Each structure stands twice: as C-alpha cells, then as structure tokens.
Image (tube, rainbow, N blue to C red):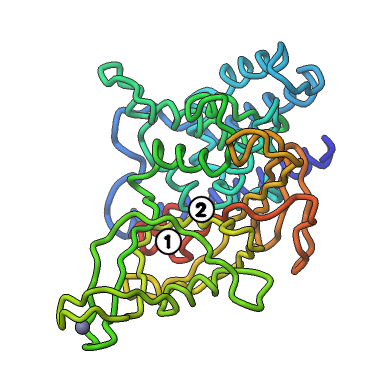
Amino acid sequence: MNTIVFYANFVLFCSRRVRLLRRRRQGEQRMSADSGIGSTEPSGSGPPRRPIHETHADIRTILQTLYGGLQAYQSGYGDYHHQLEEYVAAHFSTELISEILQNFEVAMLELPTPMSNPNMECFCIATLQVLFACPPFVNFIRTNELDTAAHDENVPTTRQAQIDRAMKSILAQFLVGSPIIHCTPLLQLVTNVNEQDAEEFFQTLHGLYCGEILPLPKQTTLWTCDSCHSVTISDPEPSIFNLPTRLPGQDRTNMMNLIFHKTGFETEKRICKFCKDYSDGFVHTKYIFSNILRVYGHTDGSHAEFEEVVDLTEIDNSGEPSMWQLAGTVHYRSFGNVSSGNRRSCDGHYTAVVYHKNRRFLMDDRKRMMLPTNSDVPHFYGEPYYAVYYKMDWMESNGRGQNQ
Ligand SMILES: [Zn+2]
C-alpha cells in the first residue's frame, strides 16, 4: 500500500473510531444515568485517560517516521533490525500500547497488516497472522492483566508476563497498521533459534501464554458394546486434533470427514465391563472445547481442506449447538529436500490464509494478497499445515458479551 492510500485509510478509520467511541460513551452515560451508578471509569489509582486524538497524533508521528525517517527496510539482524527494535521499544510505550488496545479493534482495519521477516521468522509470522484473525485470542491479549501485574516491583516478572508484553506490542502495531512489524522480541521469548516449525511454535506459545484460559480440546470416548449395547465413557484426556485420512475414493479430507470418523465410523474390540464379552463396539468421540480449536491438516499427505464454517455439535460434549468459524490456515511449502530430522526445516516457507471481514487474504511476510472467493490457494504456497477455528458464539459462552 502506498503512503497516500495508507494515510487516507488511517484518517478514515480514525474518524470512524471517534464516532464509534462517541456513540459508546453516550451509551455508557445513558446506562449510568439509568442505573444510578456514577462514572463508568474505573475508580482505581490508574492515570487519567488521555483524549483519543492525542493517541492518534502520537501514532501518526510514529508511523510517519517508520515510513520516512528510518532508512529503507533491510532484512537480517544487522543495524537496521537493531535500530527498529529500539525505535519501537521507545515509542510504543506501555501507555500507548494500552491506549491502542483499548481503542482499536482488528475489525477497524480495512486490511490485515503484514509483518516483516528479518530472516526465517515466517513460521512465527504465519502463526500470529492466524491468531490475530481469531477474536477470542485477540480478546485474551486485550483483557488479560498479566502485563499490568508485571509492573508491580514486588512481583517477579514471569516469562508469561514478558511474552504478554511482547505480544501486546506486536498487536498494537498490527492494529494501527504499522508499516514495519518485527516479531523477533516475541520469538526470542517463546522458542530457541533452531526451532522453525509453525506447529511447534503454536504449541509452545499456546502452552506458555494462554493454555489455561483457552485450553485445547480434551476428548472423551463413548464406546457402545455390540453385545449388550451398554456405553462405556472414558475419562477426558488432552487430544491432538487431526484431520483423518481420506475416505476411499475421495481426493481430499476435511472437517466433515473428521465428524464422520468421530461419530461411529471407528470401531474397537474391547472387553465390555457390563457384559464381560470381548466384543466389537463403535466409538463416538466427544470433545470438551474452549473457544479456540487448532486442527492439523497433515496426516498421511492427504489433501487437507478446512471448511470456513463447521458445525461440531455432534462431537461437542457440552450438548449445546457448536458452530465454528475458520480464523485462518497456516500453509507450508517445502523447497525440496527435508535435510534434517526436523520435518519443517528451513528448506521451506510458511504463509497464512486469514479471514478478514468476510474476505480471504494470503499473508506472505510483507506481502498481502486478496484471494478470490471459492478459489483454491495457489499451489505455490503449498498445503494447509494447520488451521485455527473459533467458536462463533464465543462471547456468549464467555459470559462477557461487551468486550469487543
Ligand atoms: Zn457389553
């Protein structure tokens, strides 16, 4: 995007934002007048909120320098990288970041913001692009107070709090459409340099950062004995959510195929604890879900396909309707030889396909491409490696409907 278009968009969404805020503030005033509760501002000792136009002026100045003041973008970890890191650390202050997180939303962006890859960070960038397209995850970044807690000098800074600080900074830069975003500070906290696998990165990040609030699914199996028709229910255990292999005659595997497999396609021979027969029985797997779900596409080289919206009611242990929206998929393209033991070594490239305001975008480091409806992702970008879904009614199931 050129500078002029960028500023036009920026000004547009600033003014839209001001209107939105004004409307919300009026609503709050009405509410507090009705309820007789005084100010809706927190009564704590926090600093007084700055007017939003001051935030915008700061952001405009910072972005202007990023466009023109710093020398032209250079990849690698040399002087440029160092200079940019210092600039971002100095200007995206904790206060400004928290102002941005309070006042900007992903949905306010006309287009998702690309991120820059100094060198072999594509696995991290692709993962973050998909996570930023996942509202429950973004909401977690915005609303958790890990970072605030870390400001207390008496509390030792945990790795989780450090990750949160880095994540909040990257999200804030993403939300204001910063022209150069590096994920290096986060990457250094989450992983070691030898690890370049997007799946491992997701797992490590998830476990260190949000595993308690947004746990991955646990599975429980219901085994129905063929002899006596009794049902044996297993204890819930963590589950790796994989697409199954292709069905005979199909050239693709997808989420519908997964539901089919989990609802009785699979059979197992067991000793039934009711009739004591060694009997056949079918297995129905149910899952305890949080609001996000990661699904691996690769099993046996099957062509993985992730439907945009899936109904998981039949495998959702809650018994409630369970509709899921695809946030995005991480794609991997191998450049030939898998040289090391690492399946996803650096001989390849990760990209992400994300859903943004009902459109699909291919995010390839600093490049962004809109994908036509119903078209396949160009073969050049390889196969979908994993997908992230989120529960469509995640706000309701959180019990905090007004957070976004
Ligand atoms: Zn039985």
Name the kind of residue labelled 2 in the image.
Answer: Pro
Residue 5 in percent (x, y) is at 82, 42
Residue 107, compared with residue 206, is above or below; it is below
Residue under pointer 2: 135
Horizontal side of 160 relative to 373 (left or right) equals left
Marked residue nearer the N-terminal end (2 or 1): 2
> Cβ–Cβ below 8 Å for labels 2 and 1?
yes
Residue 386 in percent (x, y) is at 57, 53
Horizontal side of 95 relative to 362 (left or right) equals left
Name the kind of residue labelled 1 in the image.
Answer: Trp
Q: What numbered label is drawn on residue 394? A: 1
Give the position of the N terminus as an image quadrant. top right
> Residue at the spot x=69%, y=24% of the render?
61
Residue 199, compared with residue 80, is above or below; it is below
> Residue at the spot x=36%, y=29% of the render?
148
> Residue at the spot x=48%, y=33% of the render?
98
As helix, strand or loop, the secondary structure at mark 2 comes to helix
Residue closer to the observer: 63 or 70: 70
Decide if residue 30 is in sight here. Answer: no
Query: How many C-alpha atoms fall within 10 Å of the one at disc 1: few (<14), some, or many (≥20)?
Result: some
Decide if residue 50 is in sight here. Answer: yes
Residue closer to the observer: 139 or 288: 288
Q: Residue furthest front?
A: 278
